[in-house]
Amino acid sequence: MDAIFNRRSIRKFKDEKVPRDLIMKMIEAGRMAPSAKNRQPWKYIVFEGQQREIMLGVMEQGLIAALNEPSLPEGAKPGVLDAQNTLRIMRGAPTIILIINTNGTTPFGPPQDIFGRITEITDCLSIGASVENMLLTATEEGLGTLWIANTFFAHEPLRAFLGSENQLAGAIAVGFPNEIPEMRPRKTTEDIVEFRG
């Protein structure tokens, strides 16, 4: 419960390398999460040092291309601009973990049949459970994390860079926190719980 209540989304990190054993402890916790039909639809690619810089450069170019895409809907532009701010935060974290949905492909393809859609939803839920295990483990170990979905705005360039046909589900920025944010507002228990019976 302490890790649950103390976990924060960290956007400022110390310039200090994260020991490999702590990253592996996070991944081990993620590996033990429940998953729909035990599919375990996750793979983690850890970027540090120069490879991290290269990957973030690919993301930057993907975001620039998205902004300059003539077919970009006007309503999507604020999302891409927000992703550029997320990229700035990612550059301050010494470790970035990209999360692959090993059962997914591109989120931009044609609509799936109902069974494919259900599988996609349940795999996303499974990956979310795995990531939460990782975030809570990081909190216990004194690390700060930021769970990132803005990679979707550079999904195809990043996927090509990874050499993967699978879906990029998001990223986790990891480092030693250089801030202690206040807890953000939460809905009250009364707002979210309904007992029947």
Image: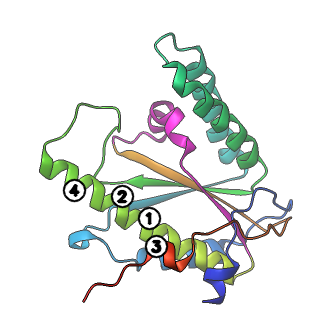
Q: Give percent across and percent down for residue 191.
A: 49, 72
Q: Residue at x 18, y 40 (%)?
A: 112
- Judged left or right of residue 33, residue 132 is right
Q: Give percent across and percent down for residue 113.
A: 13, 43
Q: Please name the residue that numbered disc 1 is placed on.
A: 128
Q: Earlier in the sequence, mark 3 or mark 4?
A: 4
Q: Earlier in the sequence, mark 2 or mark 4?
A: 4
Where disc 3 sits, the SS reads helix
Q: Please name the residue that numbered disc 4 is placed on.
A: 119
Please determine whether, in this image, residue 147 is positioned above or below residue 61: below
Separation of residues labelled 3 and 1 (CA atoms): 20 Å
**Quadrant of the rendering where the N terminus is positioned:** bottom right
Where disc 1 sits, the SS reads helix
Q: Please name the residue that numbered disc 3 is placed on.
A: 192
Camera-near label (3 vs 1) is 3
Where disc 2 sits, the SS reads helix
Q: Are marks 4 and 1 in contact (CB under 8 Å)?
A: no
Q: Residue at x 25, y 73 (%)?
A: 38
State the extent of the magenta-drawn residues as a range. 143-165
Q: Earlier in the sequence, mark 3 or mark 1?
A: 1
Residue type, mark 1 in image: Gly
- Judged left or right of residue 70, residue 112 is left
Colouring method of the image: rainbow
Separation of residues labelled 1 and 2 (CA atoms): 6 Å
- Judged left or right of residue 175, residue 178 is right
Density class for disc 2 (Cα within 10 Å; few <14, some 14-19, many ≥20) is many
Q: Please name the residue that numbered disc 2 is placed on.
A: 124
Separation of residues labelled 3 and 2 (CA atoms): 22 Å
